[in-house]
Image (spheres, rainbow, N blue to C red):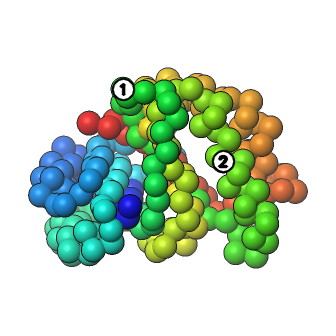
């Protein structure tokens, strides 16, 4: 599957609902397998005002509509975009249906990092869905192309049962402290994520 994520930053005093409505109307006319477009929720970090995620069968699905979205962004009070395009296959955790929150994390691994260390980092991220039961599905992907504040290398995304499942059991889980945080902490010798990250989430509907 081919995935497109955009974190949309709007000018102050913008009518958020109008922009969301335009993007949803356009997205629902596309040949997308899955669409999430919504205002970001409190707690988002560098995540924009609107989170847009679309999944297509292949890159051609996005190519045919990319210019239409570009024109919509140009015609709207958009002041900045962060985003990525990437391949990926969503994994289910066995937690069942009922997700209400979609979350994405855009990050950049230091380009001088050895491949073996990157693989260890990715393996640690993949541990999280095994232990956090509020995750219903997830995907960790390497980025094919990126836009925005950083040349993003990875996208780590999940669907959660609710906001509390993200802010509590996920972000506060000991698996974060023991395995994951060291890759992000500038005071830890294992750090490989040196740029700012984009942590963004919204409702799935």
Asked if residue 178 lies left or right of residue 110, the reply is: right
Asked if residue 160 lies left or right of residue 193, the reply is: left
**Residue 108 location (% of width, % of height):** 62, 65
Residue at 47 percent across and 59 percent down: it is: 88
Asked if residue 99 lies left or right of residue 128, the reply is: left
Residue at 79 percent across and 66 percent down: it is: 116
Residue beneath disc 1: 98
* Above-or-below relation of 62 to 31: below
Report, in whole angstroms, how far the alpha carbon at label 2 lies from the one at label 1: 23 Å
Query: In the rendered image, which quarter contains the C terminus?
Result: top left
* Above-or-below relation of 196 to 21: below
Residue 125 badge? 2
- Secondary element at tag 1: loop
Q: Nearer the viewer, residue 42 or 137?
A: 137
Q: Nearer the viewer, residue 106 or 127?
A: 127
Instruction: Categorize mark 2 by other alpha carbons within 10 Å: few (<14), some (14-19), many (20+).
Output: some
Query: In the rendered image, which quarter contains the N terminus?
Result: bottom left
Q: Quadrant of residue 78?
A: bottom left
Q: Earlier in the sequence, mark 2 or mark 1?
A: 1
Q: Nearer the viewer, residue 152 or 43?
A: 152
């Amino acid at each position: 599957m081919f995935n497109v994520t955009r974190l949309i930053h709007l000018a102050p005093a913008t009518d958020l609902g109008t922009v969301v409505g335009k993007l949803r109307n356009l997205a629902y006319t596309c040949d997308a397998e899955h669409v999430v477009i919504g205002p970001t929720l409190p707690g988002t970090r560098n995540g924009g005002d609107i989170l847009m995620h679309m999944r297509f069968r292949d890159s051609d699905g996005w190519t045919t509509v990319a210019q239409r979205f570009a024109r919509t962004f140009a015609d709207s009070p958009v002041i900045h975009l962060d985003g990525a395009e990437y391949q990926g296959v969503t994994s289910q955790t066995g937690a069942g249906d009922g997700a209400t929150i979609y979350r994405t994390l855009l990050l950049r691994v230091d380009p001088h990092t050895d491949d073996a260390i990157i693989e260890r980092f990715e393996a640690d991220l993949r541990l999280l869905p095994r232990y956090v039961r509020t995750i219903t599905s997830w995907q960790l992907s390497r980025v094919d192309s990126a836009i925005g504040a950083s040349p993003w290398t990875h996208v780590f995304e999940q669907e959660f049962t609710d906001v509390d499942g993200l802010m509590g059991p996920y972000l506060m889980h000991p698996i974060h402290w023991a395995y994951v945080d060291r890759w992000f902490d500038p005071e830890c010798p294992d750090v490989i994520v040196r740029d700012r990250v984009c942590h963004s989430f919204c409702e799935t509907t």
